[in-house]
Amino acid sequence: MQIQQHHHVAAGSFYVSHSKPLILQSFLGTCVGVALFDAEAQVGGLIHLLLPEPASQTDRTQPEKYASTGFPLFLEALYNQGARQNGLKAYIAGGALVGPLNDADLNLDIGGRTVETVRQYLRAEKIKVEISETGGFFTCNINLNMQTGQCTIEPAPLDRDPIRGAIRLSTAEDIDRAMESIQPIPQVALKILRLIDNEEYEIKTLAEEIRKDQVISARTLKLCNSAAFSGSSKVESLDQALVLLGLRLLVKLVISVSVNELFSHSGLGYSLCKGGLYYHAIGTAIIAEKLADYTGSAEPGLAYTAGLLHDIGKVVLDQAIASAYPLFYRRLMEGEHNSIDAETEILGFDHTQVGAKLARKWSFPESLCDIIRHHHGPEKASRHLELAHVVYLADLLMTRFHCGLELERLDTESLASRMEAIGLSTEKFPEIVDLIPLGVFGSSPEMTFLM
């Protein structure tokens, strides 16, 4: 008996083959997934599209990201495998709205425009659409069975068993005990956070701090000698490692290693997959760094750190959410609740409040405490106001375009004004989506090392 494998088709890519025991799957928010299968020729595939067309007409380096350039390549690959134009059947999913629409911000209907571009190609090829479930605000996954041609489109998963017994909602005392049980991040990482916040750090100062932590030093040397950085000679000293890595990557490595240990305490409360909270944090950090660089509104290294730490409150609340998971899930899917509202209704407090409390307990810089507290409502931040808006937008992009990692829903009622706070208009939204690296995790050397 053949074992059926699963293959995740990531954003900006497609997979085409003859029939085999394989399930193709994509998790979709605003992205659009299209499955095509020819039952007689036994050929099919799945494409995961990020945008309707390139944000810049000069950018043709990643054609699979866009419906206008990627979908013709997808069709060509299917025909080359033997699929017949009149034998293919199509299934379309995703295309959720980024936020509420009005006449002034139709640029936020990226998913809708991607779907329409796909439909134009399907009409031109006379390919019948069997199922189309698009729009709304919800995340879903599309699954194509490459052996039978059966395609299913399902809401974000609720296929886990809640903790047995009645739901026991956590009290403030329970949260305090949860905080006490979590191992704080190393002192060297705290020192580096403060140096970053004061924008005083230089390689000599950081090197002195890193040498005080044998684990961080050893991991730094291991990274330098890994495949990501392998060269002709072996790196044997921290001084050599620092020269190879450079200042910015060194800082990212130290903080990421430390936060990895922190997120290892979380299970399957918020996470939709193993390590979901941490992968979301890394992705938000990478996108925040790119946004800060693109807009010039914040120091990129500080933006990376703030993005990495924005959801530390979820580590504390993870067990409580695991107990109340079905209720929390329903609240988010009902359409009226964002994560903060749902947490407050169910638990009496939310992850931004708890995260800020934990950050102060560990003596984080006040600016980071402020961003952790207000990353869902960045206009309320009292320090680094623009950085708070960068982290909010990076968090939103991860949630809408790299879903399937964690349960999250941000309030987007004020999205236009929040973009304006860092010099962006809604017309620029497709351009900032285009900033998201296709391999958002693989694009980060320190993430490659940690995985």
Image (tube, helix red, strand yellow):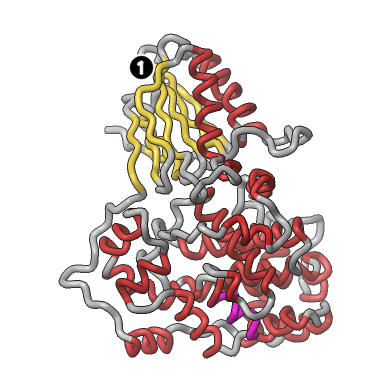
Q: Residue sitting at 68 percent across and 63 percent down?
A: 421
Q: Residue sitting at 52 percent across and 60 percent down?
A: 280
Q: In the depicted view, which residue is nearer to us: 205 or 357?
A: 357
Q: Does the rendering let one see residue 425?
A: yes
Report which residue position mark 1 lands on: 39
Q: Residue sitting at 33 percent across and 90 percent down?
A: 173
Q: In the depicted view, which residue is nearer to us: 101 or 181?
A: 101
Horizontal and vertical percent position of residue 315: 44, 74
Quadrant assignment, res 392: bottom right
Horizontal and vertical percent position of residue 161: 23, 60
Q: Assign the N terminus to one quadrant of the image.
A: top left
Judged by its main secondary structure, the magenta piece is helix
Look at the image and give the residue range highlighted in magenta: 365-372
Horizontal and vertical percent position of residue 229: 74, 57
- Judging from the image, what secondary structure is the residue with disc 1 in? loop
- What amino acid type is highlighted by mark number 1? Ala
